[in-house]
Amino acid sequence: MTAPTTVPGALDGLAIEVPSWAYGNSGTRFKVFGTPGTPRTVQEKIQDAAKVHELTGLAPSVALHIPWDRVEDYAALGDYAEGLGVRLGTINSNTFQDDVYKFGSLTSSDESVRRRAVEHHLECIEVMDATGSRDLKVWLADGTNYPGQDDIRGRQDRLAESLAEIYARLGEGQRLVLEYKFFEPAFYHTDVPDWGTSYAQTLALGEKAFVCLDTGHHAPGTNIEFIVAQLLRLGKLGSFDFNSRFYADDDLIVGAADPFQLFRIMVEVVRGGGLEPGSGVALMLDQCHNLEEKIPGQIRSVLNVQEMTLRALLLDRAALEDAQRSRDVLAANAVFMDAFYTDVRPALAAWREERGLPADPMAAYAASGYQKLINDTRTGGTQAGWGA
Amino acid sequence: MTAPTTVPGALDGLAIEVPSWAYGNSGTRFKVFGTPGTPRTVQEKIQDAAKVHELTGLAPSVALHIPWDRVEDYAALGDYAEGLGVRLGTINSNTFQDDVYKFGSLTSSDESVRRRAVEHHLECIEVMDATGSRDLKVWLADGTNYPGQDDIRGRQDRLAESLAEIYARLGEGQRLVLEYKFFEPAFYHTDVPDWGTSYAQTLALGEKAFVCLDTGHHAPGTNIEFIVAQLLRLGKLGSFDFNSRFYADDDLIVGAADPFQLFRIMVEVVRGGGLEPGSGVALMLDQCHNLEEKIPGQIRSVLNVQEMTLRALLLDRAALEDAQRSRDVLAANAVFMDAFYTDVRPALAAWREERGLPADPMAAYAASGYQKLINDTRTGGTQAGWGA
Amino acid sequence: MTAPTTVPGALDGLAIEVPSWAYGNSGTRFKVFGTPGTPRTVQEKIQDAAKVHELTGLAPSVALHIPWDRVEDYAALGDYAEGLGVRLGTINSNTFQDDVYKFGSLTSSDESVRRRAVEHHLECIEVMDATGSRDLKVWLADGTNYPGQDDIRGRQDRLAESLAEIYARLGEGQRLVLEYKFFEPAFYHTDVPDWGTSYAQTLALGEKAFVCLDTGHHAPGTNIEFIVAQLLRLGKLGSFDFNSRFYADDDLIVGAADPFQLFRIMVEVVRGGGLEPGSGVALMLDQCHNLEEKIPGQIRSVLNVQEMTLRALLLDRAALEDAQRSRDVLAANAVFMDAFYTDVRPALAAWREERGLPADPMAAYAASGYQKLINDTRTGGTQAGWGA
Amino acid sequence: MTAPTTVPGALDGLAIEVPSWAYGNSGTRFKVFGTPGTPRTVQEKIQDAAKVHELTGLAPSVALHIPWDRVEDYAALGDYAEGLGVRLGTINSNTFQDDVYKFGSLTSSDESVRRRAVEHHLECIEVMDATGSRDLKVWLADGTNYPGQDDIRGRQDRLAESLAEIYARLGEGQRLVLEYKFFEPAFYHTDVPDWGTSYAQTLALGEKAFVCLDTGHHAPGTNIEFIVAQLLRLGKLGSFDFNSRFYADDDLIVGAADPFQLFRIMVEVVRGGGLEPGSGVALMLDQCHNLEEKIPGQIRSVLNVQEMTLRALLLDRAALEDAQRSRDVLAANAVFMDAFYTDVRPALAAWREERGLPADPMAAYAASGYQKLINDTRTGGTQAGWGA
């Protein structure tokens, strides 16, 4: 197709939640590099997130991580965020950094540990009550490193019990989304390793429990868009954690490693109604900017999602269905690829300008002086990072 | 532990179903090598299977594949098998070799194709009525090779409809087991690619539908014993297709590629009650003897399962639980490995002799003259193979 | 960048060799589907290849496969090809379909088998003498399925000896290219599994021996463009076998599974001088059109290579180097992605029209009536395929 | 075979070098758990290593990591080690933890960074001069996270230059071993990702340069024993870094994840002469004891290597060659598996007792009181770990 000159209205509602921790330092077990301007407080993280939204119009909410973002007064924090034009979003729990969780948290056979992990989640729901957040996201580092280390089956049963207790505490309009991950930090077995496990567990919980799909948490070769289609079909796709990967959970910028995969995923999101108002599918980033600048890294990320969503919306479904119906493999693939190869960037630049946004948010950020400002002013204190 | 001198009674009930097609020729897309003595008829396949059972006491039933093993009179075929000391087992459908199924079978958007595929399964259930088989095993080659080739979501919905119609025809005591496979022969998407999909589909069907786990049908690195534990926990593990692999669906002899993995799988089977009478978990082989002799290949396979099951039964669960409870990772792993490293072969030789079986079934087969007999007499006709 | 209006001259020299076997039937071990119009003879394959070249200007030569394409008079075959506007290219040997090669060919410890395999390659060089082909491509199915089956080390030594004897027979201007493959049809070990082995073996042979890189023959996650860069650096990149894959050696249309990977590969080809006249890097297709139409499948393939090569040529290297030098990760990546996201299709359509080629070769083929002609006239005989 | 009662003499020479850093804390990017008794100094690490050797007789040398183990007086450190019954071994460089190496070290296009990295290696050779170490082991974290981030080809050329300068400084009897790694910490491309690259680079350097094979540094499914056989054949196998993995570079205890793979590797080591005096193949551990106790973790590791080496030595090579020669796949595999399934533990217990070593080193350690001693006395200070 020729490059589009207008943008479907469906794109107007696109909102991508950014994680507070993306603005802090991250790295590998080998090294975490620090950078100038890194936030020291949750407020500074929110400032950075707000800058991303200001320049893109795409990131109206910020996910928090407890305890990294723990504050005394969450209502005040919410007001602070709103003052900057964004709001607080998903609350992420953390049961992987306390020494007590060395051998598990919600799955632990040590009742005191399991109790503590459950209580932590109840605290997170309290935070949600205060912030008005809808979603509690549960990602567990639980697992084992050696065969025989623990009883896989018993852990699964305890997981079910723990989740049930947390689920029971959810208020009206609140949801629990359970993330799965293939491996890491556990290296033999992970207690929620695949969508099947998250589906089975959330199905047992009830209608307020959903699956969180992190695009980097699959075995090599996994067809992720199939899982997207399946979870939408089953009514259990709660949210995405977007990022990209060449190898493991590399947490690279979404769309950077395999842009065509992101296109295929967004095609299934559109196909399955995931962009429609009320679908309940939350689009979030979960990335690590180990080497690149963090704020422009986030800007690049939300733009990548926007560009690929637009390509998915441009897919000529009528032509596609015609070709599919006639079993013309090459014709169907050609319609599909045509949307992918279309250059949507000029149309999006125009779309932005119509809305008073900079045509090129990356350039606008570079020109804004914001990075220099934070580099100069965020001195002293402890830079935020995992564990901070 | 020191080598065991006796064998737990639980091993007595071990039964491994062998597939009729393992006795025919198989190969890769590059070449199918023929071998002397290959059966030309289903009766000859059953003869070979009966020889495996005669020498091992482990393989009392033979799975059939329709249409490869289609006969006029299934009752007569059952009588023939019983005359040789074995019985007919699972009925496997085939919707991947007719030209009409080029673009799908139970998932096809061509109603006439889908009708034909459903009817084929109804025919299989008729065969089951005649043979007294319990299980209808459904493995589908359905999928696509190119993004956009077909509508992934629509195919899943049609799959559900097709399966529901087949399921409705099941008689009392009959079951449907739905096998999943990561890829091949489809190379972009497969309609039942993972246990989650098979679980979701069989859950929707009802209590007579189960998941079939083929040990070669997973993404690289997948923790298969976790899936075993999970499916047993969910009450949905219907059957195993045993084989082994280094790369893809290599269909090598079970236990040949990663014996420790087979051990871990059998440990979870035992842990989850899968060996108990009435568990409903069927153990089957599904392998290709491309290079090795077929009958001794099958003997080797059932022996491998038996040896590893015994190791799993010897696992000192009390000591294991003690070590697990004390979070002593190395101690727990040591108990686990101790069972794996125990040499169970002498005890099994004695166990066989007590039952009038040859102590060394492989040697007994070599000495039996059976191979020479079939090499000499099975001349002319068409050797069985995939598609024969 | 804005869509280009002109095309760099470097693209004019782009030539992609097509394999004769792509026009025959292919499939998986489960099923080979036949299609109307499939060639019965090598001449008909060449007709089809010539049609691809006629419509694209990109495929001036056809690779042959011996014995599939064996004829009495190769000089006459060459004349036939030239009469259709194409020429005969690489000669591919085949040591995987004779029964004698069940356990190996050039690596066999059976001297008579090894002799036969060597002689087959000498015959292939005779064919090259007759056709004027430059390259002998050696891909071996050699390997084992089970640990212990054979002596890995001894096989490697014999491989070296066999190759040395073949190499010694090469005439002036002739080359040997040794292809590597991760697995299949062997499932435990493959005798030339990786570029390191092909490099070590061809290094030992001498300056007329090179590595053939098939883009589908790597382990999951392998960075193929790194290997391209390395082999160009070492002066040992002889040729490409282009195709694409999601899982194993799927042999899908090049660029279909991961277009961005193809872009990265072509960027390294350009960077390393692989497109320059005299580089000696041969670009070939090696694909299987199991489900899609074969001739348009080939047209689509050479167009994909052309489009991605143009994107690679459009890469703003000065800007890229600037960003790299300043360690601006996001800026460097942005320059890189800008070339990838540029829509080159209009410029290529114009480029074609300037040269008297159809602007849209796929549409031109559909409108040409050629498919109907061959469907109607190629009746009777045996359709070509692997082994035919 | 029946369990052996004696142990081949070849086992007497088995020596496995332990890494000083295995006794310090390690973990994942998510969390590093501390444990009581962790060494604070290199001397305490050597104490722990000496304890492993005292109880097993298998670990006579300790590898150092510079700068983690930097001291003023290396000769004194060597004397200290010898006083405890061990000696200092391989010197490992580190160019991944200084901020300057964020974008590369030996491959950097920043000359000052590259100079610093080269100088660091020259310092390491000075340490070797002082300690009498033979090997300089070079593992590089160099690579990029995003396509386009840097020039892959240029980095390879600079790597060659840097290595040449380091190599030139090697004294008589000193060697450089270049380790390769598939990925991590770089997530798009790694500058020495595979054995082919390490082979090509060390071949260019000369006869004192070798490849280091870390068993955890390969793509999924890679046949590692093939690489072992190939490198031994090419005379370039310098050393092993032993560990095991289910997924990525998990750094688990060697033999824990896939004991059969360790067996196959040791079979090729024996087959290729790698255990022979003068072979120059160094066996080392490189592991992380994230969850398990470190000293017994190391004891378990060297015992695993010893047990599997004995199984490899027990392989009945005459019978294996007979079966291989007769192309009896099942017989050859049976000979191979027989050695693997043989329980060598009683014979090794006897072997130990003959040498005045505890029959069960794990139990002896538990009974020794050493762990309590170090738990009680190693208080205060900073526990060693990566970066300490």
Image (tube, coloured by chain):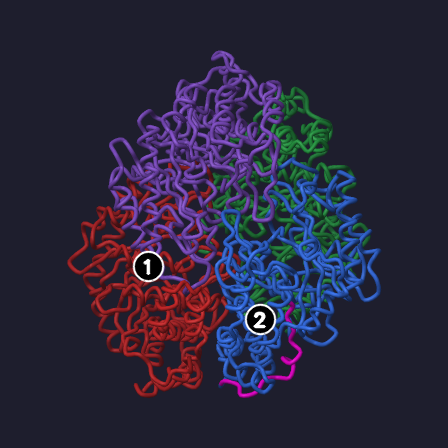
Chain colours: A blue, B green, C red, D purple
- Name the residue nearer the viewer: B359 or A81: A81
Q: Quadrant of residue D147?
A: bottom left
Q: Residue at x 69, y 48 (%)?
A: A95
| Residue D157, horizontal then vertical, whole percent | 29, 55
Residue A10 among those drawn in magenta:
yes
User: Please, what is the three-letter code of the amino acid marked with disc 2?
Assistant: Val
Q: Which segment did they paint magenta?
A: A3-17
Q: Could you give the CA–CA distance between mark 2 and mark 1, rounded to whole angstroms?
A: 31 Å
Can marks 2 and 1 be said to lie on one chain? no
Pick whichever, A67 or B279, lies toward us: A67
Q: Nearer the viewer, residue D339 or D326?
A: D339
Q: Nearer the viewer, residue D248 or B260?
A: D248
Q: Residues within 10 Å of mark 2 (few under 14, many from 20)?
A: many
Disc 2 secondary structure class: helix
Nearer the viewer's eye, disc 2 or disc 1? 2
Q: Which mark is residue A294?
A: none
Residue at far left of view:
C172
**What percent of the width, then of the height, locates residue C53?**
33, 77
Whether residue C306 is situated above or below residue C25 in the rendered picture:
below
Q: Which residue is identified by label 2?
A: A302
Residue in the picture at 61% in, 84% down: A8
Q: Position of residue B56 (x, y in %)?
A: 62, 31
Q: Position of residue C338 (x, y in %)?
A: 43, 74
Q: Mark 2 — on which chain does it sit?
A: A
- Secondary structure of residue under mark 1: helix
Amino acid under disc 1 = Arg
Circle 1 residue: D153
Q: As drawn, is B46 to the left or to the right of B256?
A: right
